[in-house]
Amino acid sequence: MSIPEDTISRGLPGETVQPAPRTRREARERYRGSERRQVRGLPMTSTGARSLRQAAKPGASLGAGYLGLGAAVVSAIAAIGGIVLFLARWGELSNPWLSAGAWGLFAVAAIGVGLSLLTYGERLTGPAFGLVCVVLACVVTLDFAGIWHGHDIAHTASASVAAGFALLPIATLRPAREVAAAVAVLGLAFVGMAVVSTPISSDTLPGIVSLLGIVVVPPAIAIHVVHRFRQVVQRELDRVLVQSNVQAPQFAVGMLASDELARLDLAAEKLLDAVANGSDPLPLSGASASVAASLATELRLHLIEGRRETWLYHAITESEHLGRSVSVADPTSLAGHLSRTQRDGLLQALWQMVGDGRTAQPGSPVVSVTLGPVGTDGHPVTDETMDVPIVFESRGVPRRRLGPTAWSALQRIGPYTDTVRDGVLHVTAHCVVDRHPSM
Amino acid sequence: MDFIAQERDRLLRSTTRAVGIVCVALSLVAVLSALAVPLGPLLGAVACMLVMVGGFLATAWSTSTWWTVLTLAAGVGALALLFLGVDEGTRPVVASAAVPLASGALSAPLMTQRGRPVGIGLTIAAGVGAVVAVVWATGNVLSGPVTGVLLGWGLVAVSTVWISRSIPRVARRIYSIGTAHRAERQASETEAQRRQGARLLHDTVLATLTLLAHSGVGVSEQAMREQAAEDARLLRHLRLGATPQPQQSGDYSLTREEESPLGQTLESVKQRFGRMGLEVSWHGTGQVLLPSNVLDAFLLALGECLENVRRHAGVGEAHVTIVHDNETVRAMVTDSGVGFDLDAVSAERLGFKESVVNRLREVGGDAKLFSAPGSGTTVVLEAPR
């Protein structure tokens, strides 16, 4: 039998050495990446980890592109409305051509940004965003110059109002704080212009306040919606990724441990290869010897650990939301016995009970789950099956706020009873499982 | 889909809250700054606005249509009080102050009326009422406040539709990521089991790495290289997922009953110790098929015994005799080394109990140790077939 020729690189034994970070930002991002790798229990290169990173990135991440399209439609409607109003008032304006120029510039900028998004994909780099801001500033300045002599900003501003709406689609492409800064600058420009150009009186002030509202509120709401949308996407992604544990065998190693084992095996292979072909001369240098020692230690640890972890342990540790707020006590690894339906029900119930993951007392888990012990009163054990008591203690969502989804999820685990004591919801489910699970 | 539909409704409700409360607040500031509304109607309008804020806050924990009704009624009431409470001259000013309320706050409930025709109908009716009121107040269909209100309604309607459509779209993408992730998890789990199952291989790799951790001192350079090459080869096979053919060792061949990714045979045990300076001679003939886990335990125990001979016996040769019957396979490891007093040196100190006896007992076998000072050592290993 022929084995394909080895393709591993002849680098240093052990870890591949990354070049030092060049900028502070790079160092921070790398640190965050390594931290996430630790926290989430997913290897960096897996689809799940990549999707989570992508969803957390500002810009047109997972689904925000379509939302941005909607925002573009909204701002186009606003712009068309503005143009119609502007043309209807052409005769009342002291210097309509300057405002018309502002509208022209606005249209050119909108078409430019649209074409660039179509060509280069749904992203807006920092410099491009800066350029857009400069163009919008020109639009606002031109429009302000055009309406200056009217001394009635509330009834004459047109293209400058559209500049606020132009920030709506940008809110899906850039980090919130940048857009918020742009909104704040625009709002201040309007306040300054109103104070300078328009005599402030009880007749004009209401109109000015409404105008400010029209300029500032839509992009501010857009920032809020995009933020919440991202949260929804990240949560759902987290939930869907964790859901894959439902089909895991009774005991699993977990994706990270498996990845680590492969990495250690590869590092050991490289080291041994280097020793065998003499590129690492014997006796080994101190550095290589310590690499060998740490590889041996890590490999030993990885070969011992990992066999006794259930799907529930992996689900909780891999999930950003559940990991923060759920504690599990399962000393005898009973979770491994649960069937797929029961596991699904248990996870669903946890997601429902966790809510947004906040409690009155910080530090304590929002939901505690205890599995077992088996054979206690009212939980019979037979040759084939056993009745595992699963006890939930939930401080997350009050009982009346738990919807039918939560109760039907609990029903899937087994018959349950629930009580409320001191604001803490206690649910005890009778989960009848196979003593010799096939999974 | 259940879960994300719930999340979508929460997103829309929170947007309703944000839009509604901000717009009411704006209108409140604008109306107060107009200084045109007499105290009576003003207090009434402010009360109505506070009721609206309460109604919006209630969407956080209740989805009842009654809250929508209350909010809309309060909004229309506020508009009526404001417009009817002032004279004709100041009415357009108050109208421009009421634009945020009439456009944003009254249209915001639209977002939470998914699948509720009654709610949608009531909200639209309130909207039509608001537009008519603003047209009447300003006396012009094309006035700024009227276009502002119409624009606000259009924007809220488009946003509602777009947000509710974005969520199922992104959900489909997330589910396809989930499917890919599930497949990856299964593959990685299988891979981890395969690697962890190759215990015997890892045992020799760990032994070699431990030697290398001491810079390879104490073993001849040539032997170290050969051992490293052999282990690297086995690791490469493991990485490439190959199943090397078992090799013959003397006349005895031990084969796995079931196919497993790595064959490790008596021959490689012999080679391993040969390189480290212990000559192992095999005795016995025949072919034994063993279950994978039994074979692993058996060979690991055997390797441990030979390692003890190498370290402690002070001789360069060991004999291994293998016999088998229908139930068991036995290996007798003998050396003519220094031996030791069984009572003086406890078995634990040699790691004998842990690394040999327990390993074999795990698979239903056993091990016995015989020795006396000056007359060598014999270990009998037993494993079930």
Image: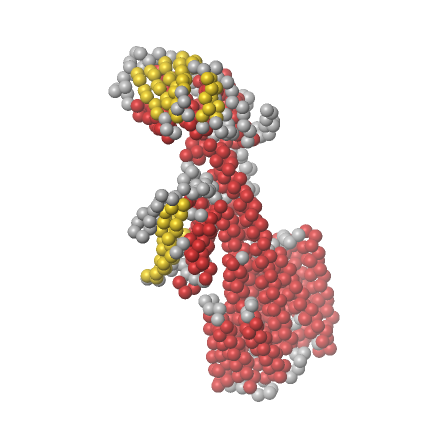
Give above or below for A307 relative to A202.
above
Q: Position of residue B125 (x, y in %)?
A: 58, 77
Q: Is residue A365 left or right of residue B46?
A: left
Asked whether the viewer can see residue B60, the reply is yes
Quadrant assignment for the C terminus of chain B = top left
| Front-most of residues A101 and A383 | A383
Asked whether the viewer can see residue B210, the reply is no
Give the residue drawn at x 60%, y 57%: B169
Q: Position of residue A8 (x, y in %)?
A: 58, 30
| Front-most of residues B366 and B151 | B366
What colour scheme governs how the chains and residues are painted in the rendered image of this protein? secondary structure
Q: Is residue B369 left or right of residue B326?
A: left
| Front-most of residues B114 and B57 | B114
Give above or below for B218 relative to B182.
above
Give the residue drawn at x 55%, y 37%: A19
Q: Position of residue A22 (x, y in %)?
A: 56, 42
Q: Position of residue B144 (x, y in %)?
A: 64, 77
